[in-house]
Image (tube, rainbow, N blue to C red):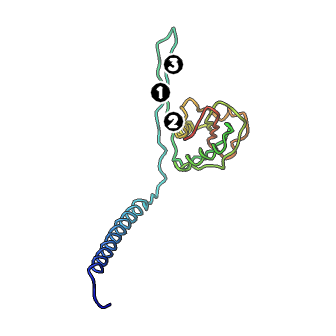
Amino acid sequence: MDRIERHDIINALFLALALLVMALVLSILARRLVTTVQDNDIVTTQKPEPEIVPVVTSTTSTTEPTTTTTEAITLRVPSEVQVLVSNAARIGGIAGQGTDLLKAAGYATLPPTNGNRTDRSVIYFLEGYEGDAVQVAGLLGMSSEAVAPMSELTNGSPGEAHLVAIIGTDQVLR
């Protein structure tokens, strides 16, 4: 029993090697965690300025030459934009999926709702939130043509929302 055999030495070496590898992996993970925390601990004392995005629109006439005008659209920090997502497709959970997607992008979201069934998906916006509506449309896989002023919202009230995303049967979230 006091005799050390060759397989005992091999087992001890494998155990020491396994412990060494585990210590190395843990130190790498700890270093990554510290680096991530340091990167995320950036504190801003100033509120970021809204981004101004130029939008170019063209008009054509048969008697006049084409004119081009540029108007500025403001984009806010997503956390400053309240979005309500409504399921008008009657596909279970689609408003929740849209809400989760926008929440992951940093938007302030209201609890998802069900709306009247419709085929057309639309993002309605309060005055001054058109650029944000275009951004949200893109995140939800809709074109910028799916954006409309809140005054065109016929069903329900936006409540606290700056944007109301109606997801119709023409839209499939992934």
Q: What residue did someone put label 2 on? A: 73
Q: What element does badge 2 sit on? A: strand
Q: Which quadrant of the rendered structure holds the C terminus? A: top right
- As shown in the figure, which amino acid type bears the numbered disc 2? Ile
Percent x, y of residue 59: 51, 18
Given the current orientation, which residue lies at the most extreme top position?
Answer: 63
Percent x, y of residue 123: 61, 36
The residue closer to the viewer here, 28 or 22, is 22
The residue lying at 52 percent from left, 37 percent from top is 138
Q: What residue did someone put label 3 on? A: 59
Percent x, y of residue 85: 64, 43
Q: Quadrant of residue 126?
A: top right
Q: Quadrant of residue 15?
A: bottom left
Q: N-terminal of the two: label 2 or label 3?
A: 3
Disc 3 and disc 1 in contact, CB within 8 angstroms: no
The residue closer to the viewer here, 117 or 111, is 117
Say whether residue 114 is left or right of residue 37: right
Given the current orientation, which residue lies at the most extreme left position?
Answer: 6
- As shown in the figure, which amino acid type bears the numbered disc 3? Thr
| Mark 2–mark 3 distance (CA, rounded to whole Å) | 19 Å
The residue lying at 63 percent from left, 37 percent from top is 167
Disc 2 and disc 1 in contact, CB within 8 angstroms: no
Say whether residue 168 is left or right of residue 42: right
In the image, residue 41 sits, relative to residue 86, either above or below, namely below
The residue closer to the viewer here, 157 or 20, is 20
Q: Badge 2, how many Cα within 10 Å: few under 14, some, many 20+?
A: some
Given the current orientation, which residue lies at the most extreme bottom position?
Answer: 2
Q: What residue did someone put label 1 on? A: 56
- As shown in the figure, which amino acid type bears the numbered disc 1? Val
| Mark 3–mark 1 distance (CA, rounded to whole Å) | 10 Å
The residue lying at 47 percent from left, 42 percent from top is 51
